[in-house]
Amino acid sequence: MREEQSAGGVVLLGNAILLLRKYNGDWVLPKGKIEPGETHEEAALREVREETGVKATIGKYLGEIHYTYKENWDQSRSVHKIVYWYLMKTKCMDTIPQREEGFVDAKFIHMDRVVDMARYDDEKEIIRVALKEIKKGH
Ligand code: ATP
């Protein structure tokens, strides 16, 4: 099975967390593949910047998620994926969703609504971990 490793961020601005909306309506956290020679932290920051236009600073490591999916071009091939997540902070309110990657919106969503909006259960769980960390820090 092919293995893929990505990294991403739960980005905090005030009372809000950054989510991306895909062309199909799903709201997801920003993430992307780790490039050779890059640390997980560097990849997470770069992907947040590329996918949302937001320049952030790194915070605590939040954990990893695992899932498997089928290759688009060959449904008999599975990919096992690990995504490493980091808490991040920003002061940058302006977002630029990366349309070439199929993202139609990037928005800061209030903490009270963000878990409900996120499409995937494993991302919801990472957001819950992040919210706990954020509340500890206040
Ligand atoms: P990356 O953003 O890391 O470059 P990608 O856009 O190439 O990744 P994924 O976002 O991993 O690919 O999506 C590949 C498949 O996995 C899609 O079918 C997607 O619906 C599914 N998927 C994406 N995120 C999750 C998740 N958190 N849990 C389960 N399945 C997911």
Image (cartoon, grey):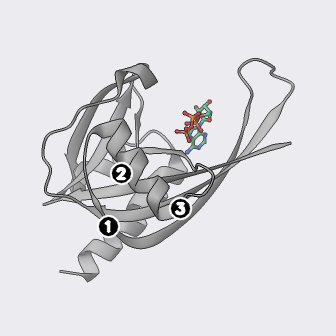
Instruction: Measure the alpha-carbon separation of dots 2 and 3.
Output: 24 Å
Q: Is residue 87 above or below residue 109?
A: below
Give x and y (percent) for residue 121. Answer: 52, 49
How packed mark 2 is, by other alpha carbons closer than 10 Å (few <14, some 14-19, many 20 or more), is: many
Instruction: Measure the alpha-carbon separation of dots 2 and 1.
Output: 10 Å
Whichever of callouts 2 and 3 sits on the residue coming sooner in the sequence is 3
Q: Which residue is mark 1?
A: 131
What's the amino acid at mark 1? Leu
Q: Which residue is mark 3?
A: 40
Q: Is residue 58 above or below residue 102?
A: below
Which numbered marker is on residue 64?
Answer: none
Disc 1 secondary structure class: helix
Whichever of callouts 2 and 1 sits on the residue coming sooner in the sequence is 2
Q: Nearer the viewer, residue 14 or 45?
A: 45
Disc 2 secondary structure class: helix
Q: Quadrant of ligand 1?
A: top right
Give x and y (percent) for residue 87. Answer: 36, 65
Q: Quadrant of residue 132?
A: bottom left
Whichever of callouts 3 and 1 sits on the residue coming sooner in the sequence is 3
Disc 3 secondary structure class: helix
Within 8 Å of ligand 1, the CB of disc 3? no
> Looking at the image, is mark 3 or mark 1 nearer the viewer?
3
Image point 15% across, 59% down: which residue?
15
Q: Is residue 50 left or right of residue 68?
A: left
Work out whether residue 117 can be spotted.
no
Image point 59% across, 48% down: which residue?
35
State the quadrant of the C terminus. bottom left
* Disc 2 and disc 1 in contact, CB within 8 angstroms: yes
Q: Nearer the viewer, residue 117 or 35?
A: 35
Q: Which residue is mark 2?
A: 115
What's the amino acid at mark 3? His
Give x and y (percent) for residue 51. Answer: 37, 37
